[in-house]
Image: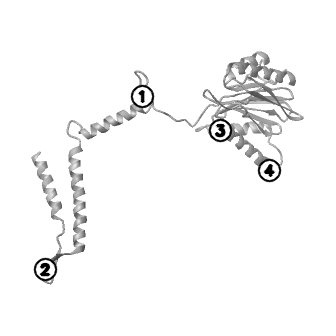
Amino acid sequence: MRARAKRRSNTLSTLFSSIPRSRCTTSGKTSVDIRSHHRSRRCFSGILILTLSYNVYWQIRPREGSQSRCYQKLNNLDRKMMLSAGPQQHGGPTQHASWSPYDNNGGTCVAVAGKDYCVIAADTRMSTGFNILTRDQTKVCKLTDKCLIASAGFRADAITLHKTLQTRGIMYKHSHNKSMSCVAMAQMLSNTLYMKRFFPYYAFNLLGGIDNEGKGAVYTYDAIGSYERTGYSCQGSGQALIMPILDNQLKAVSPLLVPPQDGATPLTQEQAVDLVKDCFATAGERDIYTGDEVEIYVINASGVHKQTQELKLD
């Protein structure tokens, strides 16, 4: 301790001895040079700041084997801020508030393919948590005259994906003087989703339309582009309620059969539309994220036709 105090005393003496003391004589009298006086004041202020910093360092630096009071206060304050940052589970780790770039806005999409038609439908409710954001948000987008897409999940990602597909479809039409086929559009959608696999679109898609042979086609996707052509499918929050009904009524052909068989449903166009309406009426009664209204699009040789049906509003 004495050696430390002696070192501090020598350091302060050295600092104070460096203050300039310039004087000049004029007409036999001693006067202080004004500029030298200002330099002395600035130098003294700097030395004073260094002195205070020097003393503060010796007071708050960590002691051997323990921490100083200042460090202990900082640690206690940091601990209090961590505890107040978020709720804490009883007996568990501290829970901190988190942010996610994704949200699930709910909704249900259904598609059924027939021998010469395709029915694709989706409800219009958009929710987050237990809040309904809007009751008239469409989930179906027209890509070409014979191809539509319906998307459930995060609405912002779905809209971005639809705009990307529409833009690429227009570019293809300008380059080849014809619209992209349903099969080509299905492959392009798979490539687009796979391209974003490291930060994927949080959207679960159904692509429906008429292929080059005039048969109905339904393609179902996961979030990163894996897809399959089926006779019917469902995506969204009501999938667990609707898929058992479709399996029971349509009895899909296994894709493992060799040679592959046609997966188109045996129902007529009117029967398929009625089945879709019944599915949404059932899901609307039991799923809080499905409701308000269902938009039903029928694609056939004559074009795209739309009809709606009211669902529960609560």
Quarter of the view holding residue 307: top right
Query: In terms of secondary structure, where does tag 3 sit?
Result: helix
Q: State the mark number for residue 94.
A: 1
Quarter of the view holding residue 215: top right
Whole-percent x, y for residue 28 in the image: 12, 82
Is residue 268 visible to the viewer in this orientation of the structure? no
Residue at 15% from the left image edge and 52% from the top image edge: 8
Q: State the mark number for residue 29.
A: 2
Q: Which residue is mark 3?
A: 156
Kind of residue at disc 4: His
Residue 268 higher or lower than 66, as above or below? above
Q: Which residue is mark 4?
A: 174
Kind of residue at disc 1: Thr
Q: Nearer the viewer, mark 3 or mark 2?
A: 2
Residue 263 higher or lower than 302, as above or below? above
Q: Nearer the viewer, mark 4 or mark 2?
A: 2
Kind of residue at disc 3: Ala
